[in-house]
Amino acid sequence: MSQAITAAPEITLGRTDYGLILQQVSFEYAGVRILEDVHLAIPAGQFVCLLGPSGCGKTTLLRLIAGLETPAAGAITSHGESVTGPSLERGVVFQDYSLFPWMSLRENVSLAIAKARPAMTQAERQIQAEEYLQLVGLQDAWRKYPGELSGGMQQRGAIARTLALGSPVLLMDEPFGALDPVNRVKLQDLLLAIWSGSERKKTVVFVTHDVEEAIYLGDRIIMLGAAPGRIIDDITVDFPRPRARHALLDSREFQALRGRVAAKFHEDLIRRLEAETAIHGVAEGI
Ligand SMILES: Nc1ncnc2c1ncn2[C@@H]1O[C@H](COP(=O)(O)OP(=O)(O)OP(=O)(O)O)[C@@H](O)[C@H]1O
Ligand SMILES: [Mg+2]
């Protein structure tokens, strides 16, 4: 059910049938290369999952796409427009689910609605904010402040806030990482329903550590290898939708794909360990 795309695609910047284009993007923090030559074209409406070991640069890549960082080399476009800074076109759910602590949940979501739809009255915004909170199961907590909520509740609040922006591009950095298994499954299915139910499907880049989650959600899995992060595999996940969770997870095709992803991680780890051993060997005169 899956197939590798090995050749880097010919990418023409500015094409609007691509939701996102990253052309040979590299990035450094203080002279240290974090991302190397990331070359990726994401068709509008595609659901892409980004997998990779801790520290390989997944959050950094999302921040670049969001326009919060500038590439050291290469270029990024979103729906044909060059990315030069943050935009309402690209909604982000951050890894640390940063809600404004001085605002109630409803105020946090209302603020996003005010940004996206300034013509709405405050009363309309509040009603809509409550609807978004209901989507993520927080309808009874709308008065609460982030400090009064569990990590998982804050994460759901941050998801509601980003969904309320209505952005055509959704960038999600381990958005379900702090959720218990029941809420995780619920939110995965909610996200899929929102994605497939919108008139114009959103382009999604979803970072996760969880291979099963990536396969269940994604049309495609981009695997980043360890430092400096670069694409080590690009896998099409063509299981039909809507996906029946249990049947899919039990299927031989699913297991085979999971095995392939795990093997790729293993291969990358071995390559890294060998490289480190070679460096230490040289340093120790072996
Ligand atoms: N503000 C910063 N200044 C300097 N280095 C940074 C900064 N932010 C991240 N880094 C470094 O960049 C690399 C990539 O970090 P990043 O947060 O993108 O990784 P990640 O893949 O998201 O990891 P995780 O899975 O743990 O969230 C790491 O080596 C990290 O130490
Ligand atoms: Mg991260």
Image: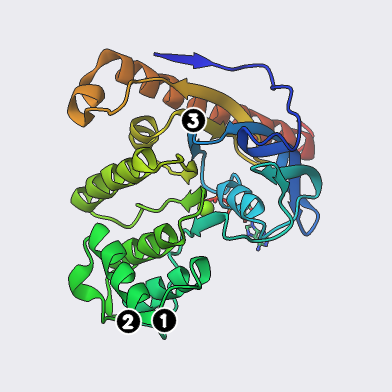
Q: Nearer the viewer, residue 272 or 284?
A: 272
- Residue in view at x 44 percent, y 69 percent: 113
Query: In the image, 54: left or right of 10?
Result: left
Disc marking residue 221: 3
Query: In the image, 251: left or right of 264?
Result: left
Identified by mark 1, the residue type is: Pro
- Residue in view at x 76 percent, y 50 percent: 71
The residue at which mark 1 appears reads as 101
Asked which secondary structure carries label 3, the reply is strand
Identified by mark 2, the residue type is: Tyr
Discs 3, 1 touching: Cβ within 8 Å: no
Q: Is residue 136 visible?
A: no
Asked which secondary structure carries label 2, the reply is loop
Ranked by sequence position, the earlier of labels 2 and 1 is 1
Query: In the image, 179: left or right of 119?
Result: left
Residue 111: image location, x then y, percent? 45, 75
Disc 3/disc 1 C-alpha distance (Å) = 34 Å
Task: Find out if the beta carbon at label 2 lies less than 8 Å from the nearest ligand 2 atom.
Answer: no
For the N terminus, give its image quadrant: top left
Q: Nearer the viewer, residue 49 or 264?
A: 49
For the C terminus, give its image quadrant: top right
- Among the 4 quarters of the image, the one containing residue 238: top left
The residue at which mark 2 appears reads as 145
- Name the quarter showing ligand 1: bottom right
Query: In the image, 265: left or right of 136?
Result: right
Q: Nearer the viewer, residue 54 or 203?
A: 203
Asked which secondary structure carries label 1, the reply is loop
Residue 127: image location, x then y, percent? 29, 72
